[in-house]
Amino acid sequence: MDRSRINIAVIEPSQIIYEGLSNILMKFKKNFYLYRFYDLEELKNSVSKESFTVAVINPSVIQNKITDFIKLKSIQPHIFWIALVYSFYDEELLQKFNDILSVTATPEQITHKLEQISNAPEKSQQEDLSDREIEVLTQMVNGLSNKEMADKLNISIHTIISHRKNITEKTGIKSLSGLTIYAITKKIIPLDYNSI
Amino acid sequence: MYQTHKTYITPDMKMSDLIIENPKLLLLLEHFEIDFAVKDKSVEQICSENKIDPSVFLVFGNLYNGFFPDKDEINALNDISIIIRFLKNSHKFYKHDKYPELKYFIKQLHEKHNTEDILLIEKFFNEYFEEVLEHLDYEDSVAFPYICRLIEDGKFAGELNFSASEYSDHHSDIETKLTDLKNLLLKHISLKNDFSLRRKFLFSLFELEFDLNIHSLIEEKILLPLVGNIETEPANG
């Protein structure tokens, strides 16, 4: 959940190209973290665990899996999808990406592009929960389901889920028992000695 | 998936050099029951002296160094019994080494800071480890014996159905709570003094996390697919 980290997913079959890209980015002082994937499927399975800012993909990888790719893009709208191009591809295929990076680009161009993207949607750095999030957290640790919370706070389940996501992102804590401890140490809820 | 890291281990490399570069490889040696005094021996020599299939050693060693094997490398592993031995030894390490160690540190913290926060952390940790132990016991008493029977008989033994996704859910649950614990201690719970004790506790926690991550990878991405291969193979004879 470290916000200064910029996670970059790379799907590039060539080891030489991957290592080259990785070396260029590692030398750059920004907080780039590279993860290599073998195929779209592997990336899809990981996006739930790790959040990526950018995905750099060799278009050949998605050539026969365009539907899967579009689906993944729609589930992960905040990821910026870049095609890493070093041979000829159909214009239509390349248009599925947000941007194109040529293998002949200089290190400065590459890092500049990635820096621009990673700076664009500046997320709030503050860790403090909003009043609404505190309300949701309180209900959560009291054992209410999403549905019950939605009814009680008079907001949609969708909003509840998005509050929960923000709470986890801000606190770095996901499990209910972990969040309970957080709520107690921050004096959001009182400690019930009977429950210990 | 792998994160770009340092040295890709090959059979001719000197084990001592590798350990000096990445001391976490000591955990690898321990799980393989290889003595730490490796002298000037190469990886290959260490393997043959300890009767360990070098392909398994290389794949696991490279996981500790941050490289994930590709599908061909995984499918080429044919000594499943050594993989099981490695995993069983890791279980012993979690149960009889890490857990008592972490428990001891928390207990000491609690003795020095008799606060609500630490009391809650202690409770969280104990509950967390109960879950871990339950999972380890399941593997030791059900999953591993099943796999061993499968290797001996060379054919599908029926009954047991542990799915990779179930495994993965279990593992991610274990990892989530560990991350929570780390974040509670690093971000939310402040204590005065006792740097040394807290540092030891955190280092120990990081070591556990590192080893557990690799452990899950081995089980989910290496062991289960290999077992799947045997299960679907037509029985020979």
Image (cartoon, coloured by chain):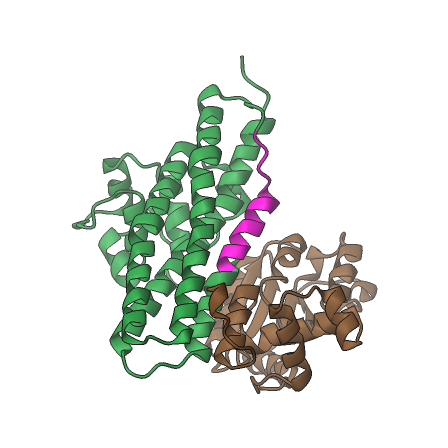
Chain colours: A brown, B green
Residue displayed at 20% across by 50% down = B36
Q: How many marks?
A: 0
Of B61 and B13, the residue lying toward us: B61
Q: Residue furthest top?
A: B237
Q: Residue furthest front?
A: A194
Instruction: Decide whether residue A169 is among the magenta residues.
Output: no
Residue A137 in percent (x, y) is at 62, 74
Residue B24 vs A53, above or below: the answer is above
Query: Which residues fall within the magenta stretch?
Result: B160-175
Instruction: Decide whether residue B168 is among the magenta residues.
Output: yes
* In this picture, residue B109 sits left or right of residue B234: left
Residue displayed at 63% across by 58% down = A43
Residue A28 vs B26, above or below: the answer is below
Residue displayed at 32% across by 70% down = B110
* In this picture, residue B164 sits left or right of residue B43: right
Q: Main secondary structure of the magenta part?
A: helix
Of A3 and B130, the residue lying toward us: B130
Quarter placement of the N terminus of chain A: bottom right
